């Protein structure tokens, strides 16, 4: 997967449990686990906003794009 979810890093920095985070964001702990483990196919902007509000961070602190080494680079469009 090219998008890496870094919720666990932000939770550790704040010494916040998954249960507390889930409650404050309005998710179930199971759904937080799906996000943390990179199994989510999508995240609503309202959920991302709530996560950033609770963790006092930016979306880029929670999500990172990492190039897939098996994927060919996308060529630049012609000028």
Image (spheres, rainbow, N blue to C red):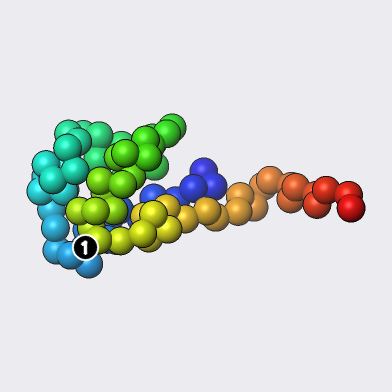
* Depth order, front residue of 50/34: 50
Tell me: residue 34, above or below residue 10.
above
Mark count? 1
Residue 35 seen in this snapshot: no
Query: Which residue does the image show at 88% across and 49% down from the upper left?
Result: 78
Residue 54 image point, x, y percent: 20, 53
Q: Is residue 25 above or below residue 61?
A: above
Q: Could you say which quadrant of the image residue 48 lies in?
A: top left
Q: Residues within 10 Å of mark 1 (few under 14, many from 20)?
A: few
Locate residue 45 relative to residue 20 in the image: left or right: right
Which residue in the protein does label 1 denote?
A: 12
Q: Quadrant of residue 23?
A: top left
Q: Which residue is farthest bottom? A: 13
Residue 51 in the image, given as x and y percentages of width and height: 26, 49
- Residue 5 seen: yes
Identified at 30% across, 40% down, the residue is 47
Q: Residue at x 18, y 65 (%)?
A: 14
Left or right, 39 with reference to 57: right
Which secondary structure lies at badge 1? helix
- Residue drawn at the location 42% of the way across and 58% of the way down: 60
């Amino acid at each position: 997967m090219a998008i890496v979810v870094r919720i666990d890093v932000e939770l550790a920095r704040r010494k916040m449990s998954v249960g507390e985070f889930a409650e404050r964001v309005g998710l179930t702990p199971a759904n937080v686990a799906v996000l943390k483990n990179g199994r989510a196919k999508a995240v609503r902007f309202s959920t991302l906003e709530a996560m950033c509000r609770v963790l006092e961070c930016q979306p880029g602190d929670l999500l990172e794009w990492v190039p897939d080494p098996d994927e060919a680079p996308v060529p630049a469009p012609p000028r």
